[in-house]
Image: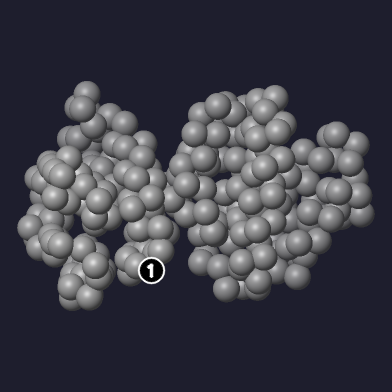
Amino acid sequence: MKRLFTLFILASSLVPSFAQKHVYEDLLAAFVDENYEKCLFKAIGYTESDATKKDPMPYLYASMSYYEMSKIEKFTAMEDYKKADREALKYAEKYRKKDKDREFFGNYDDYWTDLNTMAMEKGINHYDAKEYSKGKQLFDAMTSYYPENPGAWVMLALCQYNSNLAKEADLAIKEFDKAMAGVGDISTLPEDQKKLLRIALIQYSMYLKTKGMRDEALSVMDKGKDHFMDDPEFKLQYEEVQ
């Protein structure tokens, strides 16, 4: 909580410099006090008000409140909050649509790491269980609120390929290529994104190999060869397609 408190005090000190009408100190206070339900109600109220519905911050506070509530059994046992994790992703998507120029985005890196990690773990579990529709929902949300995350695009494409949505999957791979070009050096990615990218490259290479596309499978692995060869699973898959 100390980390979040420091983060939000820093973020709140920056808010007046942005082109929005409200500072939302009430949301900050409720969140820091860990009164997540109160923060959520207030945030949603702002998203429904004509005066503030275009501001990005209420959507972010709603997302963060849902995320914290998704970790608390008292809330997840309630009908209204049993899908709080999905709601956190939904409001993160809505937030990003309001903050297209990323004025606020970079001030909340710790939160994106936490949200990415949650979505990544659940999405990969669904993929491994061949629950591609459920996995697709999660990775689609990830690419909506964080389109710069390359591994999320690959996992989205894999869920789509396995759901006979080849055209959509091909478009997702194009977005992956765009995201990779934007990254430049994989070592600059946050740790959660590096982990997802490593897993995604392995899974995509395995998928291509099952389709008899060994050269393409090797080409995929080559994208991460200089960064992930110390990982035994990555090294094994690389050797499998050589």
Tell me the quarter of the image containing the C terminus.
bottom right
Q: Could you tell me the amino acid type at mark 1? A: Gly
Location of residue 182 with respect to 118 vertically, above or below: below
Residue 79: x %, y % from top left: 22, 24
In the rendered image, residue 125, in percent from the top left (x then y), is placed at 54, 36
Determine which residue is flagged by label 1: 106
**In which image quadrant can residue 57 be found?**
bottom left
Where's residue 151, x and y in %?
61, 52
The percent position of residue 103, horizontal first and vertical second, equals 35, 67
195 with respect to 39 (left or right): right
Q: Residue at x 43, y 50 (%)?
A: 145
The structure residue drawn at horizontal position 55% and vertical position 57%, both measured from the top left corner, is 149
Q: Is residue 232 left or right of residue 195?
A: right
Q: Is residue 84 visible?
A: yes
**In which quarter of the view is residue 132 placed?**
top right
Residue in the image at 15% along x and 45% along y: 50
Depth check: 162 or 101 in front? 101
Q: Secondary structure at mark 1?
A: helix
Q: Is residue 2 visible?
A: no
